[in-house]
């Protein structure tokens, strides 16, 4: 009713007030800046730019000065005179002291949202020197990684499949290369990475844990530029610039490829051929239409291949994994009047994988091919209405068609015809949302909303979800802000996977009778302490999550296709649904962070104290047990020091207490055929799931960047050292027999001290 | 040369021992249990119960608690609703275990039997109900094929059954093979488990077992059996556990058990016997 009333009042409001609107971009590149504070000191009111740099602010007197300020950029003060449309270009600042003005009128976003600094990502010391936004996100409080070296994210006790990862609005279903060691995102091509930890606004939905919203750069509208790097594992190149005359259009293309094949070749025996490589590429075009409208087209494609081929007397054998993503986003922006912003997005995304096993023995082919995937096509409509200073109403509608290829098997034996069994499921998902972001006073700000969703598979039950969202911010003093949040979320897609590293062979499946949608609720409270002009910022938060209809694994479940290969004749009888069970979960904890930033020194500290437990039907007597994500202590300290103008030293130390895992408690001998033969096998018995904690992990990573200034641009060499004190951090634990036949528990580590060198450049 | 390069690289980065290390202070809780196995068949002449003791998965167990040796000195009984029969220890290497003649117990269809084991302060018991004879092997079809080349022929038997509607049908296919000796007499039977199936509506109108190979100069007896959910669950999970051993990417596998206070299987098979020739 309230919204109806506002809609009725809207035309009169639009007519009755003068409005200042426009777009804020980065000077030089023309990239739009999101979250810029547009502040009117005379009235004490302000507004922030949206994801496309657009703002709209009602002003009674359009001659008063307006300050445009953004962290890391020099502020600009504009007396715009009589004009009602003001586009502003901010220049990146060399000194953080200029951010003082920013804080005067800034609106603290709370502990629920983190915008990752891409500069920080480029400075981080990482494995093999490969810059990765996921490794940057892992340094935030409340975020941890599944296993050392992996890029997956556990956000506030959620599993990686509970994170919605968006690239220009299109979901990316498997965001990792090389079995999870590296994300698919090339940091050179990115404009912004935003993480919402649980309490995400109503415009986001479809997952229960977190949203990682990745936006690509739009391409420099003024000049042609390029950037890239040559590292131990990959090389990459990004080019961007204006298209045509008039600076109406720009482009960006980016590509990356690994040459891990070469390293693998060093250890490949004769008669074998091994494949291990990935590539990815992305592009973006944007075109400014007359009247300020904009059209964007962006896309991504990437693929991994991992396989081996053996040649032996009498035959050959070939095994392979092959997986990849594709996304395509077409977006149209239109400023309606001066106080409404319309965004229409058409999106397409696809993830698929193929597993192949072929043997040719005496000219006879025995083959097995397994492929699966998910494909989405959809359209979203977003309308932002700027009702007043600090008051924005957002509406939207989403329609997405999911197409699942659950499992397909292709067998060719003894020259017989190829048989293909494919199971496809189509499931449309719809959502409507409304969100009201309102600065009630200079102290109180509220964002409340509602998301209604509907999941309607072509066959099977229909599910609906109601997702209220609330975020409340209170400025107790200029330095101290308090936040409260609540969100209820629904997830209609499940990922069937093993509990270890998320392999690309994991299957996305729709909610069904036996696997109803996951539902989550989260309550959070936080505080941020940031004194004006102080280089220090402190934040602390508490959260509590409840999860319902959580998907878990029955004892003995397996989804690994290698197991199918072990017994291909049984694969046709395996019902994957039989492997899963459902239950509930809870996660709670506290997050602490501190940041220091001066001209030469930057320090970030994050600590998380967390508990995560699940209760699953048929597991551990249906009592709550420590979930895989249950890492009690997670501590990171990272920083950089500008030693000399051309030398930057960076370091990151991280500590994570051990996560639970399942190890056998006892061993016993069993007859192959009870009561008849005496051929025996040894079996392990696990008393409980996740009853053992693997040892803690900790390591120190270091890097030194040496900047050069060649005539054609800028460049820097980076020398890195991953795991500087060579800590054997466990990747997994297992039992093994020693030479004296004593059975022991062992930990397997993957990464000793690993030096790296990389050359990065921009022009 | 390439191996030398790799070894040098590993040596520079630490040493090969870096990657796999023993966790010296690992404390894995252990409680000893009895592991009991039997498959009761009315068509067999002997009931055999296998009794073992679990050993710690980590560390050095005492010599008498390795988990591998048959437990001697246990009290093993099988009982129905009316009587309890004690079993005695047999040392026959092919059928080692606690045994009793089926002529004494007289296993019957529909009978509910409990196998109990007591050893020191440990007890374990498992109960099973033998399926009815009616319908066992209904719609049985056995086809034999001959494949091969260059004078070598392999005979295979393909067994299928009607699949009754419903979700609770479980089957075993056992194969008893007796080779002919040079003097024309039959040797001792060797029994193998060919396959097991869970018959469900979704699996279609017929159930197909995996094919079995019929070796020449042998007598082949097929046992097409109805069994229990616990038996199929045990066999499936046991195979999965074996396949997953040493695979860090697989979910740790808990082998199914229907033995209270212990581990293992008290299963059964109600069989129809069919001789086949290659």
Image (tube, coloured by chain):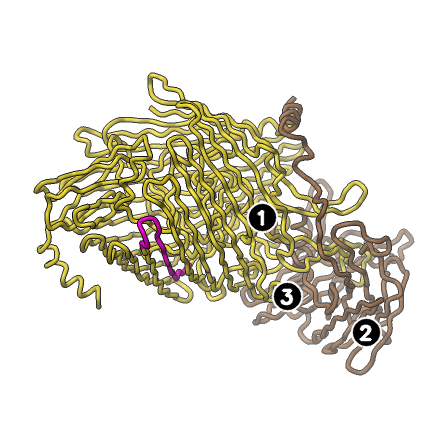
Which structural element holds mark 1? loop
Q: Is residue A240 magenta?
A: no
Q: Nearer the viewer, residue A202 or A544?
A: A544
Pointer 1 and pointer 3 on the same chain: no
The residue nearer to you, when weighing A496 against A416, is A496
Q: Let me know if marks 1 and 2 both belong to one chain.
A: no
Residue that numbered label 3 is attached to? B161
Give whichever of discs 3 and 2 has the lower sequence position.
2
Q: Colour of chain A?
A: yellow
Residue toward you, A345 or B57: B57
Colour representing chain B:
brown
Name the quarter where the C terminus of chain A is drawn: top left
Judge whether residue A394 can be spotted in this image: no
Q: Is residue A363 above or below residue B120?
A: above
Residue furthest to the bottom in view is B82
- Residue A657 image label: 1
Q: Quadrant of residue A488?
A: bottom left
The stretch in magenta equals A475-491
């Amino acid at each position: 009713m309230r919204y109806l009333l506002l809609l009725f009042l809207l035309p009169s409001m639009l007519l009755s007030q003068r409005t200042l609107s426009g777009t804020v971009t980065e000077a030089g590149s023309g990239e739009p800046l999101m979250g810029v504070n547009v502040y009117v000191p005379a009235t004490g009111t302000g507004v922030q730019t949206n994801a496309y740099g657009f703002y709209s602010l009602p002003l009674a007197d359009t001659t008063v000065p307006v300050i445009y300020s953004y962290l890391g950029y020099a502020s600009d003060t504009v007396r715009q005179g009589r004009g009602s449309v003001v586009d502003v270009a901010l220049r990146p600042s060399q000194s953080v002291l200029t951010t003082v003005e920013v804080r005067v009128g800034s609106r603290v976003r709370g502990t629920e949202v983190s915008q990752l600094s891409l500069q920080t990502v480029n400075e981080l010391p990482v494995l093999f020197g490969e810059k990765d936004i996921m490794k940057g996100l892992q340094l935030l409080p409340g975020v941890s990684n599944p296993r050392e070296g992996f890029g997956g994210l556990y956000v506030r006790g959620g599993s990686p499949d509970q994170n919605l990862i968006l690239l220009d609005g299109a979901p990316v279903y498997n965001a990792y290369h090389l079995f999870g060691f590296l994300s698919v995102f090339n940091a050179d091509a990115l404009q912004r990475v935003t993480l919402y930890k649980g309490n995400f606004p109503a415009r986001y939905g479809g997952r229960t844990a977190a949203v990682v919203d990745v936006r690509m750069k739009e391409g420099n509208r003024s000049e042609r530029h390029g950037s890239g790097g040559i590292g131990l594992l990959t090389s990459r190149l990004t080019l961007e610039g204006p298209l045509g005359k008039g600076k109406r259009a720009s482009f960006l293309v980016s590509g990356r490829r690994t040459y891990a094949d070469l390293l693998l070749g060093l250890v490949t025996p004769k008669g074998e051929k091994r494949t291990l490589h990935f590539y990815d590429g992305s592009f973006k075009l944007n075109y400014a239409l007359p009247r300020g409208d904009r059209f964007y087209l962006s896309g991504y494609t990437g693929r991994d291949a991992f396989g081996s081929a053996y040649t032996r007397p009498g035959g050959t054998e070939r095994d392979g994994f092959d997986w990849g993503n594709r996304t395509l986003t077409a977006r149209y922006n239109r400023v309606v009047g001066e106080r409404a912003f319309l965004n229409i997005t058409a999106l397409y995304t696809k993830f698929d994988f193929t597993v192949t096993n072929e043997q040719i023995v005496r000219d006879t082919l025995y083959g097995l091919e397994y492929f699966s995937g998910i494909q989405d096509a959809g359209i979203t409509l977003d309308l932002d209405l700027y009702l007043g200073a600090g008051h924005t109403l957002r509406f939207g509608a989403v329609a997405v068609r999911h197409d699942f290829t659950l499992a397909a098997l292709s067998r060719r034996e003894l020259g017989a015809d190829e048989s293909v069994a494919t199971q496809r499921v189509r499931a449309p998902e719809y959502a409507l949302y409304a969100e009201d972001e309102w600065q009630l006073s200079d102290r109180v700000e509220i964002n409340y909303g509602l998301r209604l969703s509907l999941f309607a598979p072509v066959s099977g039950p229909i599910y609906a979800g109601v997702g209220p969202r609330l975020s409340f911010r209170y400025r107790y003093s200029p330095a101290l802000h308090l936040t409260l949040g609540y969100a209820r979320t629904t997830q209609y897609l499940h990922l069937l996977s093993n509990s270890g590293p998320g392999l690309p062979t994991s299957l996305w499946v729709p909610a069904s009778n036996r696997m109803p949608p996951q539902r989550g609720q989260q309550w959070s409270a936080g505080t941020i302490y940031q004194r004006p002009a102080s280089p220090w910022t402190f934040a602390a938060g508490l959260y509590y999550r409840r999860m319902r209809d959580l998907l878990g694994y029955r004892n003995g479940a397996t989804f690994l296709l290698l197991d199918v290969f072990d017994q291909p004749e049984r694969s046709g009888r395996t019902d994957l649904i039989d492997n899963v069970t459902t239950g509930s979960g809870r996660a709670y904890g506290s997050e602490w962070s501190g940041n220091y930033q001066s001209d030469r020194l930057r320090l970030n500290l994050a600590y998380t104290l967390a508990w995560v437990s699940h209760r699953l039907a048929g597991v551990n007597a249906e009592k709550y047990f420590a979930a895989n994500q249950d890492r009690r202590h997670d501590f990171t300290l990272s920083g950089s020091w500008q030693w000399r103008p051309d030398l930057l030293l960076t370091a990151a130390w991280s500590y994570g207490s051990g996560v639970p895992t399942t190890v056998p408690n006892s061993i016993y001998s069993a007859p192959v055929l009870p009561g008849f033969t005496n051929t025996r096998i040894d079996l392990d018995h696990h008393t409980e799931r996740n009853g053992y904690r693997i040892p803690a992990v900790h390591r120190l990573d270091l890097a030194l960047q040496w900047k050069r200034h060649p005539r054609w641009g800028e460049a820097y060499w980076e020398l890195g050292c991953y795991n500087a004190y060579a800590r054997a951090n466990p990747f997994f634990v297992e039992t093994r027999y020693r030479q004296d036949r004593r059975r022991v528990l062992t930990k397997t580590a993957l990464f000793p001290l690993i030096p790296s060198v990389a050359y990065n450049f921009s022009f | 040369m390439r191996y030398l390069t790799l070894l040098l690289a590993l040596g520079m980065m630490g040493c090969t021992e870096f990657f796999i290390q023993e966790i010296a202070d690992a404390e894995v809780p252990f409680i000893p249990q009895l592991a009991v196995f039997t498959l009761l068949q009315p068509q067999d002449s002997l009931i055999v119960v296998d009794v073992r003791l679990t050993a710690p998965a980590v560390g050095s167990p005492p010599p008498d608690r390795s988990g591998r040796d048959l437990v001697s000195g246990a009290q093993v009984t099988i009982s129905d609703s009316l009587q309890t029969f004690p079993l005695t220890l047999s040392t026959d290497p092919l059928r080692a275990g606690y045994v009793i003649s089926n002529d004494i117990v007289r296993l019957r269809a529909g009978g509910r039997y409990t196998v109990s084991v007591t050893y020191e302060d440990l007890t374990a018991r498992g109960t099973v109900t033998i399926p009815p004879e009616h319908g066992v092997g209904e719609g049985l079809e056995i086809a034999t094929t001959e494949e091969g080349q260059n004078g070598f022929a392999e005979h295979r038997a393909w067994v299928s059954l009607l699949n009754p509607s419903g979700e609770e049908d479980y089957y075993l296919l056992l194969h008893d093979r007796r080779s002919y000796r040079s003097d024309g007499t039959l040797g001792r039977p060797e029994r193998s488990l060919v396959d097991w199936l869970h018959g469900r509506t979704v699996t279609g109108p017929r159930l197909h077992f995996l094919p079995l190979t019929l070796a020449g100069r042998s007598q082949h007896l097929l046992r097409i059996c109805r069994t229990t959910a616990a038996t199929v669950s045990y066999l499936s999970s046991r195979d999965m556990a074996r396949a997953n051993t040493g695979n860090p990417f697989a979910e740790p596998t808990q082998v199914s058990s229907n033995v209270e206070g212990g581990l293992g299987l008290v299963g059964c098979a109600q069989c129809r016997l069919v001789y086949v020739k290659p």
